[in-house]
Structure formats: structure tokens, C-alpha cells
Image: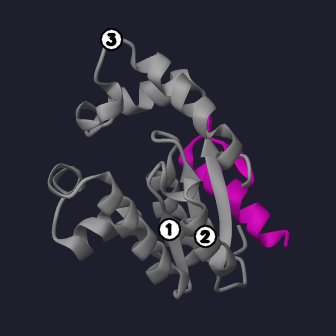
Amino acid sequence: MMQPKFSDNVILTGFMGTGKTTVGRLLAETLEFELIDTDVYIEETSGKTIPEIFASDGEEVFRQLERDTAHDLSQSQKKVISTGGRFMLDPENVALLQPSGRIFCLTASPEEILRRVLGDADGIERPLLKGADPRAKIIALLEERQSKYEQFPQVDTEGQAPEEIRDQILKQLNST
């Protein structure tokens, strides 16, 4: 697979469990870019975990930290940026990051997302899964976010190995 000749960032968005972190890691290795997970970046720069930020400061402070992160990362090059599930739903974050690189939205069916998240070591900690019907919650949130996710090129991750997904994205990067 030929390495793209560009220095722009590659930004991955999409719902939880669609493979942003796994595919992001593979893309970063292949491109020899730095991988930035926005949630990890926020935790490192704030000195608090995301649950601590929500508990002590509230969601609005967290969303402002996301905007600060988008601003910081918009000034960078040669990064693969794996965003939190709601990060790119904020038009301000999109406006900041879009000029700095290519954005791809990873997708999967609600059933596949549920399977992946339940199999994830962090699955227990995900607030989305609390309650009687996590599948119904996933479907409702996907429907709510669909119009914003659709503004980006879609990459279906269902039934594919992470390496295949990486190769699809690389092919798209090389074609422009």
C-alpha cells in the first residue's frame, strides 16, 4: 500500500464502537503520523478523567475543553485524530478541524456497535449501556446524530478487519 504524500491530518469521527481508536492506531503507524485520541488529550491537558470533569465541572465545561482541543489540533500537521463520539457534532469543532485535514466517519450497525462495546474492556463504564435496552439507546442516538455524521465521507467498518478499513481510508487519501 502506497503511503500518501501529504502532511494534512486525518480525522476519524463516528459513534462509539465503530473502530476509531483501533483504525486510528493502524493509520498512524502506516502514515508515520502521531495518533491523538481527543478524550486522552483532554484528560492529559486538564489533569482530570472525563467522568471527573462531568462530575465536578459539568458537560458544558467538557464541551469547551473539546473546542479548546479542536483549536489546538487545528494548528498541527501529520496527526491521526480519533475523536470522541460527539466531538465532530459540534459545528465549531468541524470548522476548526476541517481545514487541517480529511475527515472520515466510521460506521457500523447498532447490533455490531453493541457487540463491540460489550466486548470492550471499557464497555462496563459506558453510560450509554446503563439501563434495560442499550440497543434501543444506540439506535436512538444514531438517528439523532445521523445528519451530522453524514456530512463526512462514510466508511462502513462492519465485517471488515481493521487493516481493511485502514486500507480503504488510505485509498481515499491517495485518490485526491
User: What type is the residue that disc 3 sits on?
Assistant: Ala
Q: Residue at x 66, y 63 (%)?
A: 103
Give above or below for 36 relative to 73. Answer: above
Q: Is residue 113 left or right of residue 176?
A: left
Q: Position of residue 162 (x, y in %)?
A: 55, 48
- Label 2, label 3: how many angstroms apart (C-alpha)? 37 Å
Q: Is residue 38 left or right of residue 76?
A: left
Would you identify the image quadrant in which residue 117 lies? top left
User: What type is the residue that disc 1 sits on?
Assistant: Ile
Give above or below for 163 relative to 173. Answer: above
Q: Residue at x 54, y 25 (%)?
A: 140
Q: Is residue 1 visible?
A: yes
Earlier residue among tags 1 and 3: 1
Dot 3 lies on which element? loop
Task: Read off the residue under disc 3.
Answer: 132
Q: Is residue 13 left or right of residue 52?
A: right
Q: Is residue 59 left or right of residue 13?
A: left
Q: CB of mark 2 within 8 Å of CB of mark 1?
A: yes
Residue 117: which numbered mark, if any? none
Examine the structure image and report whether residue 155 is included in the region drawn in magenta.
yes
- In this view, the residue in front, 170 or 8, is 8
Which residue is most to the top?
Answer: 132
Dot 2 lies on which element? strand
- Which residues are drawn in magenta? 153-176
* Pair 1/3: label in front: 3
Task: Read off the residue under disc 1.
Answer: 81
Q: Position of residue 142 (x, y in %)?
A: 58, 32
Examine the structure image and report whether residue 56 is included in the region drawn in magenta.
no
Task: Read off the residue under disc 2.
Answer: 10
Q: Position of residue 3 (x, y in %)?
A: 68, 76
Dot 1 lies on which element? strand
